[in-house]
Amino acid sequence: MNTAIFIDSSAATIKTFTSAQATLPGSVNITTIDTANKTMSGHFSFKVHNQNDTTEKNFTEGSFTNIAYTNSLPIGGGGNDTLQAKISGTLWTAPTVFGLSANGQMVLTGVDIVTSKQIELTFPSTITPAVIFLASQEIHI
């Protein structure tokens, strides 16, 4: 299932947002996949919904560049990879990014442990460069 997840644990209550119930789930455009070096790049935009308080956050101008992915542990990003997006109008850049391909799914993750925020994009590991649309029905929490 193609999904986007945003986790904000910067407050006392951890908030999890998913594209699963958002009014406009959005899309991810995979522009390049280098299977020899196991990296991928692309763009995304989507809305995510918090099931507990029904708020939504809008992600625009999202991009990921040269995200290294692996199908084994440990995982870790490369030196020149990026993942960033405007979250409800404010630019956010993940200092740590990585990808994991396992059990038929590819998960790209951007994490900032200082601000306690995380973005995850999930889609089939067999993806080729293309625009994929995010789910609007299934809940991934």
Image: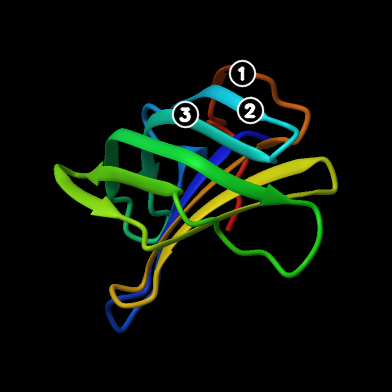
First along the sequence among labels 2 and 1: 2
The quarter of the displayed image where residue 35 is located: top right
Q: CA distance from mark 2 to mark 1?
A: 7 Å
Q: Which residue is mark 1?
A: 129
Which residue shows up at 62% across the image and 39% down it?
39
* Number of numbered callouts drawn: 3
Q: Secondary structure at mark 3?
A: strand
First along the sequence among labels 2 and 3: 2
- Mark 3 is on which residue type? Gly
Q: Up-down: is 52 above or below 25?
A: below
Asked if marks 2 and 1 touch (Cβ < 8 Å), the reply is yes
Residue 133: image location, x then y, percent: 54, 22
First along the sequence among labels 3 and 1: 3
Residue 21: image location, x then y, percent: 47, 39
**Can the viewer see residue 25?**
no
Residue 134: image location, x then y, percent: 53, 29
Q: Which residue is mark 2?
A: 33
Question: Most extreme residue toward the right, as rendered?
Answer: 103
Which residue shows up at 38% across the image and 54% down it?
50
The quarter of the displayed image where residue 25 is located: top left
| Numbered badge on residue 42 | 3
